[in-house]
Image: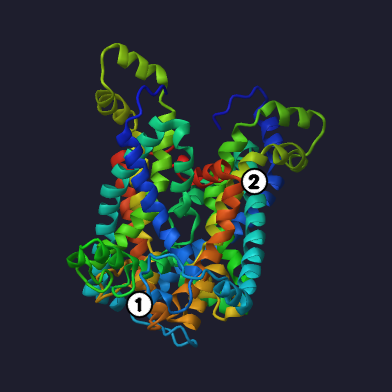
């Protein structure tokens, strides 16, 4: 009770209490929904992770830690986790610099590039499922757009089975992820650039700074908070990636694009291992918690710095 | 910011990204006007020989409007619930001096970190038990619950910006806290709700995992799954599938043509608050 009021504690308590019914009533539906659809399912997943269950009927048998032991030795799971981390790392390494470059372009162009900006934004409006199907046809080895273009400009040697080659598939998928999400970070950066006072630029120019110097010495340091926020968003987003990959490759070929979320889904809803699927699900949320925790610890104040 | 020069190279780079962004869309739209075999007999980037709406007609007659209807039903009900529930919660957190509920704010916002996949199996079994599996109603609960944390977070910030003098005046005039919310705070939260409305509409319109898991028959499914169903039906008819893709993307693109800046601002809401 740190608030400064002049009323006596008793009067304050009475006044405070008169708000209780409204507060409780207004929050009740939210709390109930979150308990039913978020909190309980997490605990239930944890419980199921100790069982064998096909999802049909009531035959859940407790098997102790055997699912967890299986997880530790499950090569596919570790490959999926690795793929998640590769996607997270490369997403940050590719998306953020390109997005920043485009944001600087848009910022310098101002109104002249308004239509460009509007067009750049379009991928964000389309569902990942639609994008997945679209790129499936773009990547198609025989009738796809990409190979057709490569063939026609005499680069036949570069035409590949983009999604069929385990060495390439993850990067092909990553390219689509970049195409889809670069516009998002571009606009985040653009908003941050627009917030930098123009006096700074004027002052630096008077002091003889070139545009390049200004960018590296002033703009970039000022964007530190935004870059950090974007990296966190990108990282956490990467860990829960699902739709696009599920449509594009289904995790294949031979697990080369498997992610924790796709693996969990297939275990539960394709192989009907609800017990083991839950184990993978709980491992997924543990990873998210550990990584978010680490990031928060390392950056401490990442909120509302944009 | 004042821009001194605008280098030709800048234009070139801007154009390159424009082509990268639009080329896939152009491929999608131009293919959708082709005949069934044209994708195999002529270069895929070529313009349609005889553009025709046949693909669109066959898709529209093939039950496409079921998906649209289901999507409109699910999204409008969910977004309506999200907005009213999160405005109510935001009012409690931003305004009501009732301490015992304050820690809930942190817990609710922590919900932002939860990946939906963790809840899929229990939500699936719950939906089956409730007897609403394979109906659009199954989607509303998870949709609302998973959208609430961000909406509450942002609307709470928004309500905090409304001058307190307004509620004080209402209280002096004898308004109950609930009445103050409905007559003073709710109308003033309009712009914040518009932002969250846009954001949640786009997100839920395109939602896939819950829709895929909690429904199974074409009659009950939402628009993102239309592609899934039609793909089975048209298997090798690429132009027809491209027509489906174009049709599913169209509503959001059309809305975007009308309210570009608004939609951009709405979609950025998730990022701007970290």
* Marked residue chain, label 1: A
- Between residues A101 and A260, which one lies in front from this camera angle? A101
Residue A111: give x, y in percent of width and height: 48, 32
Indicate the quadrant where residue A217 lies.
top left
- Between residues B14 and B117, which one lies in front from this camera angle? B14
| Residue topped by disc 2 | B87
Instruction: Name the colouring of the figure.
Output: rainbow
Q: Is residue A233 visible?
A: no
Label 2 neighbourhood size at 10 Å, few (<14), some (14-19), many (20+)?
many
Badge 1 marks a residue whose secondary structure is helix
Residue at 74% from the left image edge and 36% from the top image edge: B184
Depicted B254 relative to depicted B163: above or below:
below
User: What's the mark number on residue A276?
Assistant: 1
- Between residues A243 and B132, which one lies in front from this camera angle? A243
User: What's the mark number on residue A221?
Assistant: none
- Between residues A143 and B186, which one lies in front from this camera angle? A143
Of the 4 image quadrants, the one containing the N terminus of chain B is: top left
Of the 4 image quadrants, the one containing the C terminus of chain B is: top left
Q: Which residue lies furthest to the top in this view?
A: A206
* Marked residue chain, label 2: B
Residue at 35% from the left image edge and 50% from the top image edge: A234
Badge 2 marks a residue whose secondary structure is helix
Indicate the quadrant where residue B24 lies.
bottom left
Residue A131: give x, y in percent of width and height: 43, 63
Q: Do the residues labelled 2 and 1 touch (CB within 8 Å)?
A: no
Residue at 45% from the left image edge and 64% from the top image edge: B28
């Amino acid at each position: 009770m740190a608030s400064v009021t002049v009323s006596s504690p008793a009067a304050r308590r009475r006044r405070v209490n008169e708000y209780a019914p409204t507060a409780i009533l207004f929050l009740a539906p939210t709390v109930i929904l979150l308990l039913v659809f978020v909190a309980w399912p997490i605990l239930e997943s944890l419980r199921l992770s100790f069982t064998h269950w096909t999802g049909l009927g009531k035959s859940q048998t407790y098997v102790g830690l055997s699912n967890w032991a299986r997880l530790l030795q499950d090569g596919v799971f570790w490959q999926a986790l690795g793929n998640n981390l590769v996607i997270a790392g490369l997403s940050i390494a590719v998306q953020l610099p390109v997005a920043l470059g485009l944001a600087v372009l848009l910022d310098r162009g101002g109104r002249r590039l308004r239509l460009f900006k509007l067009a750049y934004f379009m991928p964000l409006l389309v569902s990942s499922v639609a994008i997945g199907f679209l790129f499936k046809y773009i990547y198609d080895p025989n009738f796809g757009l990409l190979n057709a273009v490569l063939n026609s400009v005499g680069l036949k040697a570069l035409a590949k089975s983009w999604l069929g080659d385990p060495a390439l598939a993850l990067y092909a998928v990553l390219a689509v992820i970049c195409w889809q999400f670069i516009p998002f970070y571009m606009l985040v950066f653009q908003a941050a650039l627009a917030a930098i006072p123009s006096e700074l630029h004027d002052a630096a120019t008077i002091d003889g700074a070139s545009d390049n110097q200004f960018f590296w010495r002033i703009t970039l340091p000022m964007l530190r908070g935004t870059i950090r926020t974007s990296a966190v968003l990108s990282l956490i987003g990467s860990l829960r990636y699902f739709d696009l990959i599920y449509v594009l490759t289904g995790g294949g070929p031979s697990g080369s694009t498997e992610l924790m979320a796709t693996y969990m889904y297939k275990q539960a809803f394709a192989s009907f291992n609800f017990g083991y699927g839950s184990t993978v699900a709980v491992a997924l949320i543990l990873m998210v918690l550990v990584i978010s925790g680490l990031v928060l610890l390392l950056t401490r104040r990442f909120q509302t710095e944009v | 910011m004042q821009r001194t020069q605008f280098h030709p190279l800048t234009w070139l780079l801007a154009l390159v990204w424009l082509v990268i962004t639009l080329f896939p869309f152009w491929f999608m739209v131009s293919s959708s006007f082709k005949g069934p075999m044209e994708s195999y007999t002529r270069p895929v980037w070529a313009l349609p020989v005889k553009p025709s709406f046949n693909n669109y007609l066959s898709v529209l007659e093939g039950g496409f409007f079921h998906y649209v209807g289901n999507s409109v039903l699910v999204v409008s009900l969910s977004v309506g619930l999200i907005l009213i529930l999160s405005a109510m919660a935001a009012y409690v957190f931003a305004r009501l001096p009732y301490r015992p509920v304050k820690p809930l704010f942190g817990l609710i916002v922590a919900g932002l970190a939860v990946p939906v996949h963790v809840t899929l199996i229990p939500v699936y079994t719950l939906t089956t038990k409730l007897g609403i599996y394979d109906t659009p109603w199954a989607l509303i609960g998870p949709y609302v619950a998973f959208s609430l944390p961000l909406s509450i977070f942002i609307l709470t910030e928004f309500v905090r910006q409304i001058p307190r003098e307004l509620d004080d005046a209402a209280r002096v005039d004898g308004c109950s806290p609930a009445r103050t919310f409905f007559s003073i705070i709710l109308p003033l939260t309009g712009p914040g709700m518009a932002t969250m409305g846009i954001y949640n509409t786009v997100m839920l319109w395109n939602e896939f995992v819950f829709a895929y898991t909690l429904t199974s028959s074409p009659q009950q499914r939402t628009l993102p799954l239309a592609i899934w169903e039609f793909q089975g039906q048209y298997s090798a008819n690429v132009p027809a599938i491209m027509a489906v893709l174009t049709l599913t993307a169209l509503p959001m693109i059309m809305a975007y043509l009308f309210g570009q800046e608004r939609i951009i601002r709405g979609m950025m809401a998730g990022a701007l608050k970290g």
